[in-house]
Every structure is written in C-alpha cells, then in structure tokens.
C-alpha cells in the first residue's frame, strides 16, 4: 500500500538522491543542494524566506508501506500572486503506473481549493515525454517553449492549469456556430466595428461592407477573388455574440479576420469549432489579434501557438499578435456540452446526445471519436450509432427520454424546443449514441 505524507527532515538523503538521479539528465545545476533547501524549508514551517515571490514551500512524499521506501515526491511553491509552481514531481520508475503521481497531485488540488489558487504551473524538459504526457492528460496547457533554458542542449516546455476563473465565464448558454445569414448582418457590423476599431485602423462601415461582399463570392473558391467564409456564434433567439471571417489563401493557409466575440464563451465556441469547418480549405489557420488574457488561454487550450509580435502593424501604439493552428488530418472534431449534460455523459447516465441537422452535425459518422468540451474539462467519446428523425416528437417515440435528459425526462420535448426553435428542428433531428473512451483529468 502506498500512502502520502508530509516530508520530514530525515527524508533529505533519499529525496536528494532522487532529485539528483531523476533531474540530472534534463537540467543543469546542483540538485542535491536544491533538495536540501526545499526539504529544510518544507519541514521547518514551510515559510520560504529566500524566494522573492514565494510565500510557502510544501513537500509531500509517497511511501510504500511494504518496505518503507519513498517512491515519489512532490514539492510545490505557493506564490504571492495567487499561483502555485510545481518543482519538482518525481516518481521512481518501479512505482510508475500505480497512481502515485495522481495521489501526490491530489494534495496540490486540496491546497489549491482551500486557498483559492488561480493557477498552477510548471516547466518540463521537452525530452521528458512521459512527464509531458502526464501533465497534458491532467488538464495542463502548453504556454510555450523556452529554448536552451535549464541546459543549453534541451528546450523547456512551459505548462499551466487554470484553477479558478473568478467569474470570468458567464452563465452557461446554448451557443451555435453557424454560417452568416442576411438577418445577422446588422449585429455583425456593430460587433466587428465596436470590437476591432480600438486596435485596428480602417475598421469602419466600408470595411464591413467589403467583408460581406467577399462572402457573396464564397462559391468561387478562388483565392484570387479574396472570397470570405463567415461564421457567427449566436444564441437560439438569434443574438450574435461572436463572428469569424475566413479568407483561404494561396498555398492553403486560412486567415481569420475578424475573430471577435462579446464574451469568452462565444470566443471559445468559435475557436473550438472553426477547425472542423475549415479543414477542407487549408492546412493551417492564423489570425491577427490583440487578445485578452483569457482569450490567450483559450487559444493555448485549443492548441494554437503565438507566431509573431507585430508592433504598430495596424495601429500606432498597439502590438498585434499572430496566432496560428496547424490542422492535421487527425484533428478531432469537438462538441461543446453544458456542464450538467457533460457530467452525465461521462458518468454513463446520458448515452444519447441530440442535435439538429447543421452541416457539421450531418457529417458525423458512426465510429468517429469526438472530443466533448465543457469549459476547460474534456472527455473523448466514440459515436456508437447515429439515428435520424424528422421531429423531436417522433424521436421521443423511439428513444428513451431519460437517456437524453436524465434529470428531467418528462420535460425533454420542451427542453429540446427551448434550445432549437422550429426552423432549426426542421433541419432534421440527429441522435448520437455515445461510448465514453476517456474522461478528463482536468
């Protein structure tokens, strides 16, 4: 049996040798001296008197009760900024695969919850693929790569995980990403001008009109015609909360300009779904933007990378950023699900997901794997079957309502119609039978 306890001063010799043997292949420096400093701090009241931003050092060890040996260690540093840094997390090779890392991380999760930590971060050697895979599987996001960082021959991957958003995210709403319709144009015009003009010169009525004219040329599929593909993120009542215009280029990159939204939920919907819509038009997406901090996080969460910083490219005094996403053929389709239904799907109490026949929904095939997302949590499901019906009422005659809306099967029809008005229901009803492949550790 393996148990986790706080580090003691008499653990220092073992911890020092573990840190030396496990860190030396990836990092320069004296790891035994590092171990001495953090073990002494963590075992003598936790207060870090040497770290400039550090408030506390806490260390836990995982001990195998059969022989009393330490098989894992976790040290983390609480910062005055409300963040925590992991430095380091180590598990002996013979103890891997037994859940030791998860047991140690649970202590960090308990601390983060108790003290309302905003963010946890760490760095991992680019050559330490096992550690990278572990952190990414547990909801950590790549922030970037520091070249030749702790050793001149090894790059360092920077990772983080958001713990609390402090109300940044609005109340969950149903948001669909749909091609632009004529009825959307007035809202899109206002949204684009209000959101972009502070950062980009030349964003005015004339510019938006040219955008719509490019959309009218979309059927040419000729990059020399500068045709546009435009999607909007909107609620069931038709309120436009976000817009993205795509311009396929020669050589098959696709530029997104604009990519703007009223709030982060609509922005996330666009960023998550656009790769599926645009895969046939090119191999890469890129955009020029001046993102907020939470938009940066959203880009990184979905695999985008910052590619350039362009001072005064569009407006004096403004630094514009270029973000890019390389789209491989293996890019997995994403589907956003409200929290109550997301939890039910992963728990197995909601094996059926119902959508209407939008183009991207109609293309989903039996056997396909889909990444379900809810905020920063995700799960992977397999489409075990696809069934179609003309109406919700007809569908409910053949499918178990409790498998669609577990907490209110009697109200399933009203719930579905509140999400999809009649004109959307007329597109056809699609029922996806789901099999859970992987649950999020985020």
Image (spheres, rainbow, N blue to C red):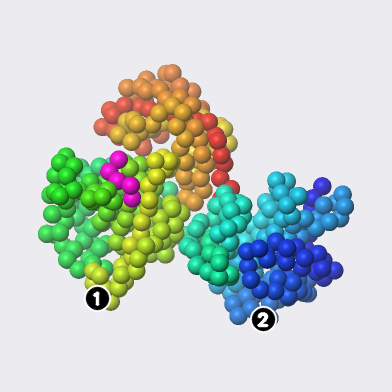
In front: 307, or 117? 307
Q: Residue 316: which numbered mark, if any?
A: 1
Q: What residue is disc 2 on?
A: 50
- Residue at x-position 47% and y-position 62%: 144
* Label 2 Cα crowd, 10 Å radius (few <14 / some 14-19 / many 20+): few
Q: Which of the 4 image quarters holds residue 24?
A: bottom right
Q: Which of the 4 image quarters holds residue 362?
A: top left
Q: Is residue 283 magenta?
A: yes
Residue span colored magenta? 280-284
Q: Is residue 422 above or below residue 202?
A: above
Q: Residue furthest front?
A: 153
In the displayed structure image, the side of residue 131 where residue 250 appears, left or right:
left
Q: Position of residue 275 (x, y in %)?
A: 35, 45
Q: Is residue 240 magenta?
A: no
* Label 1 Cα crowd, 10 Å radius (few <14 / some 14-19 / many 20+): few
* Kind of element beneath mark 2: loop
Q: Earlier in the sequence, mark 1 or mark 2?
A: 2
Q: Is residue 315 above or below residue 384?
A: below
In the displayed structure image, the side of residue 31 where residue 270 appears, left or right:
left
């Amino acid at each position: 049996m393996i148990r986790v306890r706080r580090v003691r001063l008499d653990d220092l010799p073992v911890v020092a040798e573990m840190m030396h043997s496990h860190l030396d292949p990836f990092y320069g420096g004296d790891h035994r001296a590092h171990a001495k400093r953090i073990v002494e701090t963590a075992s003598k009241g936790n207060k870090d008197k040497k770290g400039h931003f550090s408030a506390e050092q806490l260390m836990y060890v995982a001990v195998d009760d059969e022989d009393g040996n330490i098989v894992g260690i976790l040290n983390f540093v609480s910062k005055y900024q409300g963040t925590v840094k992991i430095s380091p997390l180590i598990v002996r090779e013979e103890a891997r695969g037994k859940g030791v890392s998860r047991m140690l991380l649970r202590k960090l999760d308990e601390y983060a919850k108790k003290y309302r930590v905003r963010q946890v971060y760490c760095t991992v050697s680019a050559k330490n693929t096992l550690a990278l895979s572990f952190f990414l599987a547990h909801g950590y996001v790549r922030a970037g790569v520091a070249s030749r960082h702790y050793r001149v021959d090894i790059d360092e991957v920077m990772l983080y995980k958001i713990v609390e958003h402090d109300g940044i995210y609005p109340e969950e709403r149903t948001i669909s990403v749909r091609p632009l319709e004529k009825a959307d144009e007035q809202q899109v015009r206002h949204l684009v001008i209000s959101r972009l003009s502070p950062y980009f010169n030349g964003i005015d009525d004339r510019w938006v009109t040219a955008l719509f004219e490019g959309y009218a040329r979309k059927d040419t599929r000729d990059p020399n015609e500068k045709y546009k593909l435009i999607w909007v993120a909107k609620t069931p009542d038709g309120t436009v909360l976000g817009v993205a215009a795509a311009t396929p280029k020669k050589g098959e990159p696709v530029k997104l300009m604009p990519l703007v939204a009223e709030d982060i939920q609509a922005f996330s919907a666009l960023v998550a779904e656009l790769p599926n819509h645009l895969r046939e038009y090119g191999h890469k997406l890129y955009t020029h933007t001046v993102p907020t901090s939470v938009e940066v996080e959203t880009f990184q969460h979905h695999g985008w990378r910052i590619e350039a910083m362009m001072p005064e490219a569009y407006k004096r005094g403004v630094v514009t950023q270029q973000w890019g996403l390389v789209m491989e053929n293996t890019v997995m389709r994403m589907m956003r699900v409200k929290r109550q239904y997301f939890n039910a799907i992963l728990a197995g109490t909601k094996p059926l997901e119902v959508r209407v026949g939008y183009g991207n929904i109609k293309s989903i095939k039996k056997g396909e794997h889909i990444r379900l997302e809810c905020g920063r949590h995700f799960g992977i499901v397999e489409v075990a079957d696809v069934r179609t019906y003309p109406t919700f009422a007809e569908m409910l005659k053949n499918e178990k309502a409790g498998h669609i809306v577990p907490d209110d099967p009697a109200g399933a029809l009203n719930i579905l119609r509140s999400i999809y008005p009649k004109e959307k229901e007329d597109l056809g009803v699609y029922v996806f039978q789901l099999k859970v492949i992987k649950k999020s550790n985020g």
